[in-house]
Amino acid sequence: MTTPEIVAEVSLVPSTKIQPQTSITIAVDTAYVAGQQSGNIVQGIYMMDNRVANGTTGEGTLELSTVCNIGDLVGFNAVPINALGSSEDEVEITAINVSYGSVFSAAGMPRPQPALPGEPAGAYWIGQAFNKGTQTYQIQIKVTVGKLQPISYFVSWNPFITCK
């Protein structure tokens, strides 16, 4: 009789098949951001998630306060929106950093995932909420507009996440 053998395979390439329980979408009015050219952006970026029933507040603002469950995978997806709907502008997440707290911990810090169909690299990130508590995090995005000579704008702000 032979003894069964357990073999574990570890891939260093993230899978796009991961389905986060908490999904955060960042919709960016690219024409508005480009029109500001510099200074503080306080409009034109709309954050929303699928956790309103959990107690999320601030939907549609930069002050989204997501409420997730311990162990949740948390997805971040950045998408461009504009009046014409076909400008080919791009939005990508360039960084997610901790300002205060430790919901994600080092092991769960959001990281870039392979691009989804039709989106640029960096538009989709996933992290995991490992610790109960509240965290302020800084999200940084790059907004690229224009076809002939693309121009990029960098924007950052500090939303919140609570893990219960």
Image (tube, rainbow, N blue to C red):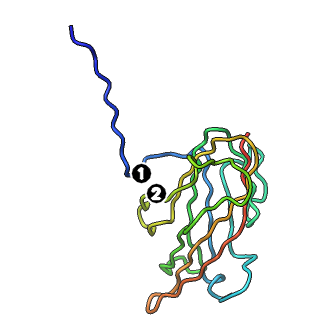
In the picture of the structure, the residue carrying the numbered disc 2 is 113
Check disc 1 and give the amino acid type.
Answer: Pro
Say which of 154 and 24 sits in front: 154
Mark 1 touches mark 2? (CB < 8 Å): yes
Tell me if residue 151 comes above or below residue 59 in the rendering. Answer: below
Kind of element beneath mark 2: loop
Tell me if residue 4 comes above or below residue 9 in the rendering. Answer: above
Say which of 52 and 85 sits in front: 52
Most distant residue in the top direction: 1
Instruction: Pick whichever of labels 1 and 2 is earlier in the sequence.
Output: 1
Residue 164 as seen in the image, left or right of residue 120 = right
Quarter that holds the C terminus: top right
Most distant residue in the left direction: 1
Residue 78 as seen in the image, left or right of residue 147 = right
Tell me if residue 152 comes above or below residue 7 in the rendering. Answer: below
Badge 1 density bin: few <14, some 14–19, many ≥20, Cα 10 Å:
few
- Rendered residue at 44%/67% (across/down): 121
Residue 148 at x, y = what percent? 43, 92
Badge 2 density bin: few <14, some 14–19, many ≥20, Cα 10 Å:
many
In the picture of the structure, the residue carrying the numbered disc 1 is 14
Residue 150 at x, y = what percent? 48, 87
Q: CA distance from mark 1 to mark 2?
A: 6 Å
Quadrant in which residue 46 is drawn: bottom right
Residue 89 as seen in the image, left or right of residue 26 = left
Residue 69 — which label?
A: none
Residue 159 at x, y = what percent? 72, 61
- Rendered residue at 57%/53% (across/down): 75
Quarter that holds the N terminus: top left
